[in-house]
């Protein structure tokens, strides 16, 4: 089976160039900051967001120097959210390595996340126009608002599907949507194509987050490479649980609520077994598939190219990933 990185071969050189910009931007003469940023290299993973931006550019027009800068910017923003997420979730492992907060403490993790956000905005300011800076600024607002909304709904076991989708639209889909939009815009695509690519990214982001939420409940930490079950520990409802609570009979619903309110370590296994006995995991997978298929359909408006083929394969891969 192909790995995600193999889908990015068409922009491999561009990803390398973007990675150099990323490293150069974070270069520091402070030994401790260098140590933190070197550890951060382990967070890169699949580089979905920079690859999406670069592939969108190639699929829609010409790939230009601004794209390499912006690919570094979106990766910095993403890294900042990961570092902050690990603090919020009290996670110990990310990419099969200790998280920043686990190794150096939450205070330094919060500051490193802020450091990354600051460099992302500084790097945006090097472009000739302010379009990207305004969009990245608005996206950062959406990311934070989505996280704030999710945290404010911890232990809200009456959370609706609509509220869940609004949360993930902010905390995940907004950045992925910005990637495909920026790729198209700076490639010189017309306004209609730019808007379509934005919708492509938003749909892909929604599907990506739903699968991520399923993996948090059912995945294998050794395969996924990060601490799992934190949403459950924090009382954050995700789509499988929302569906199960809404559609189960009263007996199962009461059992589920009893388990959710039970702080024992065995809670995750009990919830997993109850979900497996329901159709809620299948339901979540189907909804993810619908979002991703809508995104794939949007790509049909683009001329055939290797980049478009990679974008389609990338979207399909989202549904079958185990990491």
Image: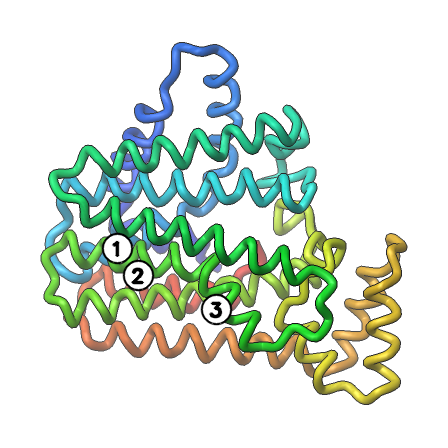
CA gap between label 2 and label 1 equals 8 Å
Q: Nearer the viewer, residue 273 or 197?
A: 197
* Residue at 88% in and 76% down: 255
* Residue at 12% in and 62% down: 189
Q: Which mark is residue 310?
A: 2
Q: Colour scheme in the image?
A: rainbow
Q: Quadrant of residue 283?
A: bottom right
Q: Residues within 10 Å of mark 1 (few under 14, many from 20)?
A: many
Q: Secondary structure at mark 1?
A: helix
Compared with 259, 225 (above or below) is above
Relative side of 248 to 123, left or right: right
Compared with 62, 107 (above or below) is above
* Residue at 51% in and 74% down: 288
CA gap between label 1 and label 3 equals 19 Å
- At which x and y percent is residue 300? 23, 77
Q: Which mark is residue 207?
A: 3
Compared with 1, 192 (above or below) is below
Q: Secondary structure at mark 2?
A: helix
Q: Residues within 10 Å of mark 2 (few under 14, many from 20)?
A: many
Residues at marks 2 and 1 touching, judged by CB atoms closer than 8 Å: yes
- At which x and y percent is residue 77? 40, 42
Q: Pointer 1: what residue?
A: 55
Q: Quadrant of residue 128?
A: top left
2 vs 1, front mark: 1
Relative side of 176 to 192, left or right: right
Relative side of 116 to 11, left or right: right
Going from N to C along the chain, the mark reached first, 3 or 2, is 3
* Residue at 45% in and 53% down: 143
Compared with 192, 233 (above or below) is above
Relative side of 28 to 186, left or right: right
Q: Which mark is residue 193?
A: none
Q: Residue furthest front?
A: 152
């Amino acid at each position: 089976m192909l790995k995600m990185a193999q889908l990015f071969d068409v922009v491999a050189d561009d990803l390398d160039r973007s990675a150099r910009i990323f490293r150069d931007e974070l270069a520091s003469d402070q030994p401790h900051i260098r140590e933190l940023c070197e550890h951060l290299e382990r967070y890169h993973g699949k580089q979905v967001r920079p690859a999406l931006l670069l592939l969108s550019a190639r699929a829609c027009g010409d790939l230009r120097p601004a794209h390499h800068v912006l690919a570094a910017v979106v990766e910095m923003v993403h890294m900042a959210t990961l570092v902050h997420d690990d603090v919020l979730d009290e996670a110990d492992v990310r990419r099969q390595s200790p998280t920043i907060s686990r190794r150096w403490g939450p205070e330094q993790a919060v500051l490193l996340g802020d450091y990354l956000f600051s460099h992302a905005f500084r790097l945006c300011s090097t472009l000739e126009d302010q379009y990207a800076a305004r969009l990245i600024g608005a996206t950062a607002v959406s990311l934070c608002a989505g996280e704030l909304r999710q945290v404010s709904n911890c232990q809200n076991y009456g959370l609706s599907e609509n509220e869940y989708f609004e949360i993930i639209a902010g905390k995940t889909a907004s950045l992925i949507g910005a990637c495909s939009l920026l790729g198209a815009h700076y490639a010189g695509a017309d306004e209609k194509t730019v808007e379509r690519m934005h919708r492509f990214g938003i749909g892909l982001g929604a599907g990506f987050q739903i699968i991520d939420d399923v993996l948090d409940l059912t995945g294998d930490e050794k395969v996924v490479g990060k601490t799992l079950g934190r949403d459950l520990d924090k009382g954050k409802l995700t789509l499988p649980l929302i569906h199960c609570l809404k559609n189960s009979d009263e007996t199962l619903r009461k059992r589920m609520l009893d388990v959710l309110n039970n702080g024992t370590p065995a809670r995750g296994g009990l919830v997993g077994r109850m979900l497996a006995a329901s159709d809620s995991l299948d339901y979540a997978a189907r909804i993810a598939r619908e979002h991703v298929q809508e995104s794939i359909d949007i790509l049909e408006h683009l001329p055939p190219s290797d980049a478009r083929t990679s974008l389609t394969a990338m979207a399909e891969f989202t549904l079958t990933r185990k990491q």
